[in-house]
Amino acid sequence: MSREKNTAKDLSAKDRTAKVKRLVGWLVSYGLDSNGIAFELRSGRIFVSSGPLLPAGQNGNNGNTQNGCIIINDESISSLHLAINATASHQLFIQDIFSEHGTFLKRSGESEEKKITGVCEIRHGDWIRIGEKNRFQVCLIHGRRN
């Protein structure tokens, strides 16, 4: 009997962790909150938007993102602004989705900011500007690469 309980408990724990995707890093901003705010980046696709993209009740399972979406209440953020693809091997790619005010990248150690025009790989320490003023530093966990 106790073996059956342990097996059921183990399966239950496996089911819970299967729903949570691998944490690969964070987008960190001090502009949105003076104490700092961090949005989890988990493997899979995440969108940056000015509002929810999925109907209520559907969940993208991306930690503190809402339904697989980072929502920024700012008029310079388009309703569907940016797509982020985080891989389980800790690579991060972004693509501006024809937003009105654009997405810009400043590489770590560089001073020039460049507009994103296609798919772009992002690295630890890079800065992303979304819209006119929303800046985020990319903090990636050093992880395995396949």
Image (tube, rainbow, N blue to C red):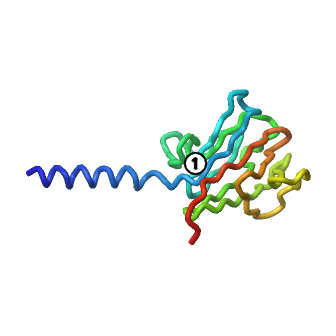
Front in this rendered view, residue 109 or 139: 109
Label 1 packing within 10 angstroms: few (<14), some (14-19), many (20+): many
- For the C terminus, the quadrant is bottom right
Q: Is residue 108 above or below residue 33?
A: below
In the rendered image, residue 111, in percent from the top left (x then y), is placed at 90, 50
Q: Quadrant of residue 73?
A: top right
Amino acid at the residue labelled 1? Gly
Residue at figure coordinates x 67%, y 55% from the top left: 84
In the rendered image, residue 80, in percent from the top left (x then y), is placed at 72, 48
Residue at figure coordinates x 62%, y 58% from the top left: 86
Residue at figure coordinates x 54%, y 48% from the top left: 62
Number of marks in the rendered image: 1
Q: Is residue 9 left or right of residue 44?
A: left
Secondary element at tag 1: loop
Residue most toward the right?
A: 112
In the rendered image, residue 36, in percent from the top left (x then y), is placed at 68, 32
Q: Quadrant of residue 114?
A: bottom right
* Residue at which label 1 appears: 68
Residue most toward the bottom?
A: 146
Q: Is residue 86 above or below residue 78?
A: below
Q: Is residue 109 left or right of residue 92?
A: right
Residue most toward the left?
A: 1
Front in this rendered view, residue 56 or 118: 118
In the rendered image, residue 131, in percent from the top left (x then y), is placed at 82, 43
Q: Quadrant of residue 142?
A: bottom right
Q: Is residue 98 left or right of residue 91?
A: right
